Each structure stands twice: as C-alpha cells, then as structure tokens.
Amino acid sequence: DIQMTQSPSSLSAFVGDRVTITCRASQSITSSLNWYQQKPGKAPKLLIHAASSLQSGVPSRFSGSGSGTDFTLTISSLQPEDFATYYCQQTYSIPFTFGPGTKVD
Amino acid sequence: QLQLQESGPGLVKPSETLSLTCTVSGGTISSVSYYWGWIRQPPGKGLEWIGIIYYSGSSHYNPSLKSRVTISVDTSKNQFSLKLSSVTAADTAVYYCGRTFGDSNYFDYWGQGTLVTVSS
C-alpha cells in the first residue's frame, strides 16, 4: 500500500492567515492526489483533485500543488468556515489511501 | 442535485455481517462515468477506503478487507450495497457511501454517513 503522511497534524491559525498543509506519499503517485475538508459530524467535501484542480463551487482561496511524492494545500486567506480537518488521498493505486489528517483550529 | 443516503442497522453483533445500502437519487447509478463506493471512519480517527463498484458489477476492494467485503449493485433500484462479514469492535465506524469520478477515482459526492457499532 502507498502510505500517506501529512504535516503538521494540527495547526492554530487566525482568520486572514495563509495556511499551508503538506502531504507526502511513500512512492510517486504522479498527480493522483486529492484534498478533502471535513467538519465535525459531516461527510468530507472534495476541494482539490488531480493535485491542483479546484472542484466546482470551491472558493478560489483554496489551491493545490505538487507532483510525484510531495504535495501542498494552501488556503490563501483563512475564513471562519475553513476551520476543519483536511485529508489528502492518493488515487494512484488501490487501496486509495488517505493521509491521517490536519486539524486547523 | 445528486443525493446519496446510507441505510442499515446501527448495531451489529460481533462475528455477524454488517449490511448497508446506499440509495442514489437525482441521478442514475448506471452512468458510464462513475464508480460508486464506500469509505469508513472509526470514531475520532481517519478515513479508510473500503472499495468501489461499477454499474456493470465490476468491483475493487481494499486488500486489507477483501476477504470479508462484498459490494454489489442493483441498477433497477438505483442502489448499491456493502456487506462486511465476521465483524469485530474494530469495524465500529461511520460508513459513508459516495460517487467516484471516472479514472480519477476521487469522491465528489458523499452520503451523510451512518454510524455502525459492533457490540454484543
């Protein structure tokens, strides 16, 4: 299985801050990397697919970059509704594994 | 608007089989562009991919669960289902159904999730 790691595991930020979350794969996954946002008691919501493609309806303050093994999710200006846990997921090979999550509070 | 809804028992006894159904509305499960799948999340923990199925019945499973998992599809009812056999407390989780897009396999639509507790 491809192992996914995320850093940091949690971070504290303020409204208006630029936030960066890193995801690393144990082997190259080309650009087969997705980002989800999850709020307590809710299903995850797709933010970014294929490493850098913004899902329809997602605010443009969210962006993704990277390829191979190293990826980044950036929130350019944190909004109150962005406090949540963020997960990366590789869809390069089965099983399509998730990172352990990064909690933004 | 596409909607997915999980249904099934919220409590399952150890060693028994967990059975859940996902009903799709606002769209057809027989679309050539999508797979349909399951993900679970133990309380307070991260996400685990369980498997996906195409409307034709072609399926792919997480190898760690493959010996216990069956995902099936009923196009006449616009539903797909999950069966997980020989459950233990470690299978206690919120189970989500969802739609995955084509070859990219990301989940773009999700059900609300249903908590299944394994306990005697």
Image (cartoon, coloured by chain):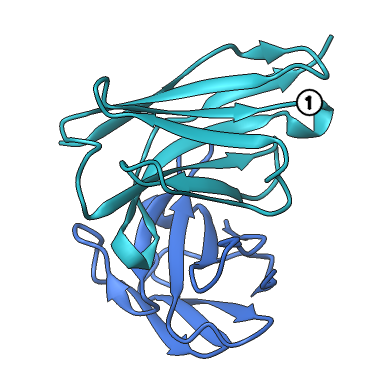
Chain colours: A blue, B cyan
Q: Residue at x 34, y 79 (%)?
A: A52
From the image, which quarter does the N terminus of chain A lie in? bottom right
Residue B112 location (% of width, % of height): 42, 30
* Chain letter, disc 1 residue: B
Examine the rendering and report whether any part of residue A18 can be seen: no
Q: Which residue is mark 1?
A: B86
Examine the rendering and report whether any part of residue B27 can be seen: yes
The amino acid type found where label 1 is placed reads Ser
Residue A13 location (% of width, % of height): 54, 66
Give the vertical position of B40 relative to B120 (above or below): below
From the image, which quarter does the C terminus of chain A lie in? bottom right
Determine whether the residue tagged by mark 1 lies in a helix, strand or loop. loop
Q: Residue at x 69, y 19 (%)?
A: B17
- Horizontal side of residue A55 vs B43, given as left or right: left
Residue B101 location (% of width, % of height): 30, 57
Q: Nearer the viewer, residue A34 or A11?
A: A34
Give the vertical position of B18 relative to A101 (above or below): above
Q: Residue at x 26, y 26 (%)?
A: B78
Determine which quarter of the picture holds residue A35. Answer: bottom left
Determine which quarter of the picture holds residue B10. Answer: top right
Crowding near the residue tagged with mark 1, few <14, some 14–19, many ≥20 C-alpha atoms within 10 Å = some
Residue B46 location (% of width, % of height): 66, 50
- Horizontal side of residue B70 vs B119, given as left or right: left
